[in-house]
Structure formats: C-alpha cells, structure tokens
Image: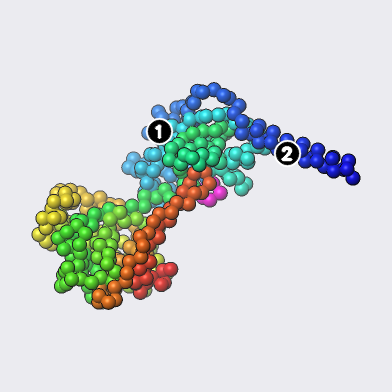
Amino acid sequence: MLKKLNSLSILAILTAVMVVWMLITIYKAEDTSDDFSLLFPELFEQLSDVDKITFKSEQDEFSLSRDDKQWFIADYHNYPADEDLVRRMLVDLADARILELKTDDPELYPVLGVEGAEDGGSSFVIKLFKDQLEVAGLVLGEARDLSANTSGPQQFYLRRVNEERSYLVEGYFQFSPMMLNWIDALIMDIARERVARVDIIQPNGDTATLVNLGQKDKFGTPEDREDTVFRYEQLGYDIAGSLFQMRLEDVQPVDGFSRGDAEIVRAEFLTYDGLKVIAQTSFNDGFYFSTFKAEYAPDAVPEVPEAIASLDVLKTPEQVQQEVAEINDKVEPWVYRLGGFVGNNLMRAKADMVTEKDQVIPMPAGGFVIKKPLKRGFFICVQPYSAAALSLSRHSSSNA
C-alpha cells in the first residue's frame, strides 16, 4: 500500500513538473534582444493605400471598405464607418512593436489564443488590403495581464497571418470584434445653447412648445416661461439638447422602411442662427424610429439674447447653409433607431412635459458609465438612462 502511494506521489510530482515545463516553454521569451522591432515594418508607408479591412472572430465577421470619400461598412447597407476609429486602428497597428518571440508550435496556439478564428477558434483575425492584395494581417490572441497599467499600451500574444511564429507584442489593440461598434454612430451634434425654440407637433395638431429663456441652460413654455413646471426638473434642458451629440442605436435605408399604422410625431428645432432641424418619429414594435432633414430659416429666428450671443456658439449664414447641406447629405437616406430617452423626448405631448408643482418627479442620483472588460482588451460601456425620465412616457413601458 505504501509503495502504491509513493508511486502515485511520484506520478503527481512528475505531472506537475511537466505542466510547469510546458507553460514555461510557451510563455518564455525565445529571443532576449532589446530591439523592439515593428510588427509590420512597412505598414506606415502603406496606410494611405489601404482600402479594405476584414474582421473575423467568434462574435462576428464583417468588412470595412473605402471609396474616394469615406470608409463604410459594406456588410451594413454601406453605412459610413467611424473615420477616426478606423484611422486610429491603422496607426496603432503600424506602431505595434514586438517584445518577445513565442511558440511556433500549432498545438500550443490555444494557450495563447492565437489558433485562429476557424472551427471555433477564439482569436480575432484582422486583415488589411490594397486593391484586393493583402498588405498585413494578424491573429490576435490573449492579453497579457498588466493590471497595474490600464491606461498605456497593452501587451498581447499574436501571430502574423500565414506565419507560424507567435509573439508578445505591445501596442493599443482596443479593436472591437462587433460590426455595429464601427458605425459612425453620431447622427448630428447641435449644441443646446444654439436652440431658440422646439415645437413638438402631434398627429392631431396639438403642439408642445419649448423656448429658450435667454440663458444657455434655461428653457420653459412660451406662456409660463420662468414659472414653467416640468414633469422633472431637467426635462426642458433634456428636450432642447436632443440633437446634442445625438447617436443612433441602429440604422437602415429609408427606402423600403414602413412605419405601418404607427403615429408620426414631428419635432422642429430652430436655432438662433437660422438652422431648422425637423425630426419625424414613430414608435414601432417597441423602438423609436426617426428621419431627419435640415432647412435654413433665417426669417423665423427671434432676437438673440445677449447671454447667448456671448457664448460664441452661433454660426454665420454661410456656415449654417453649409451645415444644412452636410446634415441633409448625411441623414436623408436613412431612418435611425434611437434610444428610449431621446426618442421619448422627440414625441412628448404637452401633458407629458409640464405638470403641477406637487406632481414633479424627483430626479434620481446621476447615472454613470460602467466599463465591463471583455477578452483581448475590448470594453463595453453601459450608461443608464434617468429612471425618472424613462418612467414618464406612455411609450416607455412598451419599450422596456
């Protein structure tokens, strides 16, 4: 019995030693050179020629393409991609540097996450093309744990596409594997300080009107002005700011889109410099859908209050006319799905906007952004809406 136990102990020790040896073999540097060479030495000179990028992972597979004007998502109605995000990714790839050589044994790839994206592989494969010829490609694997430093460059295990050798590489690899995260999500960006008036017109003609009270963050109804009692304290401010950094949740071509029997509410935003933005919003199948167009309406502009003029946010007539053209060029072909907070505000009836003092809903504690870390350096941000704002509308319960 004692001999059997001794044999089992020896076997356990040998097994542990073998596991440790295997891990050391995989993770140890095979080159101790201090020459931190570029992962793609020639990529900087080729960046302006890259016209296609493909992405493949266990989460998604898609591509970005570039024409003479912009980057767009070929797999998603050719909708524009986030130009800054694409440029940043290309520069980050060109700047990535090799720290250490790692294994070239395919059987050990899964330990580093560099086995590829085929057949259930966990890697994130990115390829760059010029005129259908591959310029560079990488198989991105696991991140090396650098929990003490989350703000600077990260370290990842990866391989170049079509090469066996893997590497430990340093760089910025915050590349999303999800197609929708590459969309140019910004619909428009109109500072609320520019907004002079908002009219929200119901299908029956009933209109809720909001006016600027001569200060950058003060709004009220024309009849009550400073004495306006909103359903919650910040509601006027929120409605006037609907076009400020307005972002989409989803998008589709306006051609072929049907609202069915849903009612359409028209919201008109007029700025002190003559920009007029018209939103037409409906509530379909639990979501808010809006189309937009812009006009130049200088004759409708009220006198500019001194407090607004001093903010230096208003534009010249020439700038506004150019802005109108740019907005229409961007938004007219599309119907946008909006978040519940903005969509709700674009459809508010007057009864959903103002109330009596004893009926005001107290504001909850402010929302905050939670960053949830995912594999390989990706992050997803969750920003909760105001619970009070979401509870107000007759539409909200259906949108939950």
Position in image of residue 181 (x %, y %)? 43, 50
Residue at (62% x, 38% y) in the render: 109
Q: Dot 1: within a 10 Å radius of its alpha carbon, few (fewer than 14), some, or many (20 or more) residues?
A: some
Residue type highlighted by circle 1: Leu
Where 325 sits versus 266, above or below? above
The tag on residue 16 is: 2
Position in image of residue 128 (x %, y %)? 46, 37
Residue 60: in magenta span: yes
Left or right placement of residue 199 versus residue 254 in this view: left
* Position of the N terminus by quadrant: top right
| Residue 217 in view | yes
* Position of the C terminus by quadrant: bottom left
Residue 342: in magenta span: no
Where 164 sits versus 218, above or below? above
Where 285 sits versus 34, above or below? below
Question: Spatial distance from mark 2 to mark 1, Cα to Cα?
Answer: 47 Å
Foreground mark, 2 or 1, reads 2
Left or right placement of residue 254 versus residue 239 in this view: right
Residue that label 1 marks: 47
Nearer-the-camera pick, 286 or 245: 245
Q: Dot 2: within a 10 Å radius of its alpha carbon, few (fewer than 14), some, or many (20 or more) residues?
A: few
Q: Which residues are magenta?
A: 57-61
